[in-house]
């Protein structure tokens, strides 16, 4: 039994909506605009022939999302830092209050350290470790070479390790 276009889109939405929003937030630093970008991404998915993109769906979605987010930044010509309130909305499951406070502090420290990296380093590190994309998928999303991606991840992680407290490095 073949999957209908509607089933294809619903399945993609269920699997990729949240990771795409998280990714778009890292670019736009605004949850509402990130949601708009992801909505645009899925609208574009609805306009595609499922059989043409089925094999590369994940990279297709991240590429469209990335391009749309950068289009918005180019139009607005401004970048805003990601504040803690916005990050907490996409951070994850609820914890006990003391665990949440410790978790929030660690997230804040990591985000501050990530903000000190170059835009390319930050993007490839987030695509690799937050979104779980392979080097090849990152190549397809960003247009960078695999060697460049490896270098950016290596140097970015080295800079992150140096800027984070010792208890983060384990």
Image (cartoon, helix red, strand yellow):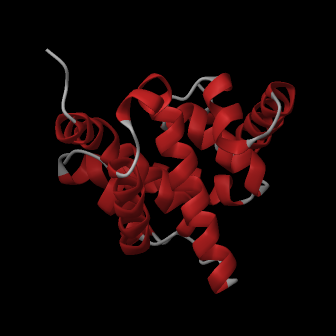
Using the rendered image of the protein, determine whether residue 102 is visible from the camera's viewpoint: no
For image coordinates 58% across by 54% down, the residue present is: 66
Residue at (58% x, 39% y) in the render: 127
Residue 161: image location, x then y, percent: 72, 37
Horizontal side of residue 105 vs 134, given as left or right: left
At a point 68% along the width and 40% down the height, the residue shown is 124
Residue 126 point in image, percent of width and height: 58, 42
Residue 69, image quadrant: bottom right
Q: Looking at the image, which residue sits at the far left? A: 1
Residue closer to the observer: 125 or 68: 68
Question: As drawn, is 145 to the left or to the right of 115?
Answer: right
* Residue placed most toward the observer, 30 or 33: 33
Q: In the visual, does 19 lie left or right of 118?
A: left
User: 112 above or below 164?
Assistant: below
Q: Nearer the viewer, residue 106 or 12?
A: 12
Let me know if residue 162 appears in the view: yes
27 on left or right of 85: right
* In the depicted structure, whether residue 78 falls above or below residue 36: below
**Residue drawn at x 75%, y 33% as measured from the top left:** 153
Q: Position of residue 22 (x, y in %)?
A: 42, 52
In the orientation shown, which residue stands out farthest toward the top? 1
- Image quarter in which the N terminus is found: top left
For residue 76, above or below residue 90: below
Rendering coords of residue 125 (x, y %) = 65, 39
Camera-side residue of 143 and 5: 5
Labels in figure, total: 0
- In the image, residue 50 sits, relative to residue 88, either above or below, namely above
């Amino acid at each position: 039994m073949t999957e209908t276009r509607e089933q294809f889109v619903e399945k993609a939405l269920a699997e990729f909506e949240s990771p795409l929003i998280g990714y778009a937030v890292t670019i736009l630093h605004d949850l509402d605009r990130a949601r708009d970008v992801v909505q645009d991404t899925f609208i574009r998915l609805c306009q595609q022939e499922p059989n043409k993109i089925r094999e590369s769906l994940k990279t297709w979605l991240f590429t469209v999302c990335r391009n749309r987010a950068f289009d918005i930044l180019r139009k607005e010509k401004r970048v805003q830092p990601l504040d803690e309130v916005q990050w907490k909305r996409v951070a994850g499951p609820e914890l006990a209050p003391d665990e949440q406070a410790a978790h929030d502090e660690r997230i804040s420290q990591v985000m501050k350290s990530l903000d000190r990296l170059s835009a390319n380093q930050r993007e490839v590190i987030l695509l690799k470790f937050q979104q779980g994309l392979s080097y090849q998928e990152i190549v397809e999303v960003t247009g960078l070479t695999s060697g460049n991606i490896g270098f950016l991840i290596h140097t970015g992680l080295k800079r992150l390790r140096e800027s984070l407290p010792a208890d983060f490095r384990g």
